[in-house]
Image (cartoon, grey):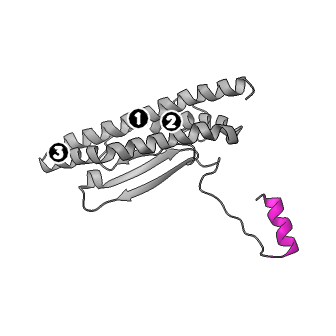
Amino acid sequence: MTNDMRALLNSLKPGVTERNRTIAVIQCSYSHVIQLRDWLPDEVGGVAYFSFDNPAQSPKIPIYAGVTNLPKSYAICGQSRYREDAAIWTFRETNRIATINWDKTRKIIEPQVMLFENMHFRDASHIEELAVQLIKEGKKEEAKKLLTDYTNNFAASAMRRWTELKAELWTIFARSM
């Protein structure tokens, strides 16, 4: 509901409606969900599911507590200005283009978000079991490398796909939908 509509309704009957903000909004810069599992080693038990831009339009990247580095583009701030080397813009550009006609483009974006979520759900238990086993064997650094590689490969795959989606969306709009 717009601010004007809310003001009108409240002027007719005070308190009839309040401002609510959904989580998935265009002005969101990032979001995360944190999972903590104390029965697992710290390196594996803590996971931040991180996404850039609108959380409804971007995949959640699993970042395990044992990860030792992230893609370089994750360390570059793209909040104040457009930067091609900032990871946020890989997602933001595609998502903004999709927002032009969300009724149509959501059928393209939402399945891709789910593809990445399902990929992690499919792979997580195997990766986590391997990492736990390595830690039990005293190979903590190998476990950290495994988790770091998994997270970085997942992030790279998501960024690559969102770059491809941007081109697909531009093609759709170039044809006037």
**Does the magenta portion include 94?**
no
Identify the residue under disc 2: 87
Question: 10 Å neighbourhood of mark 3: few (<14), some, or many (≥20)?
Answer: some
Segment colored magenta = 2-14
100 or 3: nearer the eye? 100
Residue at position x 38%, y 57% from top? 35
Q: Badge 1: how crowded within 10 Å, few (<14), some, or many (20+)?
A: some
Q: Residues within 10 Å of mark 2 (few under 14, many from 20)?
A: many
How far across and how far down the image is residue 21, in percent?
Answer: 65, 60
In the rendered view, does 54 fall on the left or right side of 172?
A: left
Report x, y in % for residue 80.
Answer: 61, 40
Local SS, label 3 = helix
| Side of 31 where 17 appears, left or right | right
Q: Nearer the viewer, residue 107 or 45?
A: 107
In this figure, which residue is indicated by the disc labeled 3? 134
**Image quarter in which the C terminus is found:** top right
| Rendered image quadrant of residue 146 | top left
Q: Name the element at disc 2.
A: helix
Q: Characterize the magenta stretch by its predominant secondary structure.
A: helix
Mark with earlier residue (3, 1): 1
Callout 2, which amino acid? Ala
Q: Is residue 106 visible?
A: yes
> Regarding mark 1 in the picture, which secondary structure is present there?
loop
Taking the spot 86% from the left edge, 71% from the top edge, the residue there is 11
Q: CA distance from mark 3 to mark 2?
A: 31 Å
| Residue bearing mark 1 | 71
| Distance from Cα at disc 2 to Cα at disc 1 | 8 Å
CB within 8 Å, label 2 to label 1: yes
The percent coordinates of residue 124 (x first, y second) are: 32, 46
Q: What's the residue type where badge 3 is placed?
A: Leu
* Left or right: 151, with 53 as reference point: left
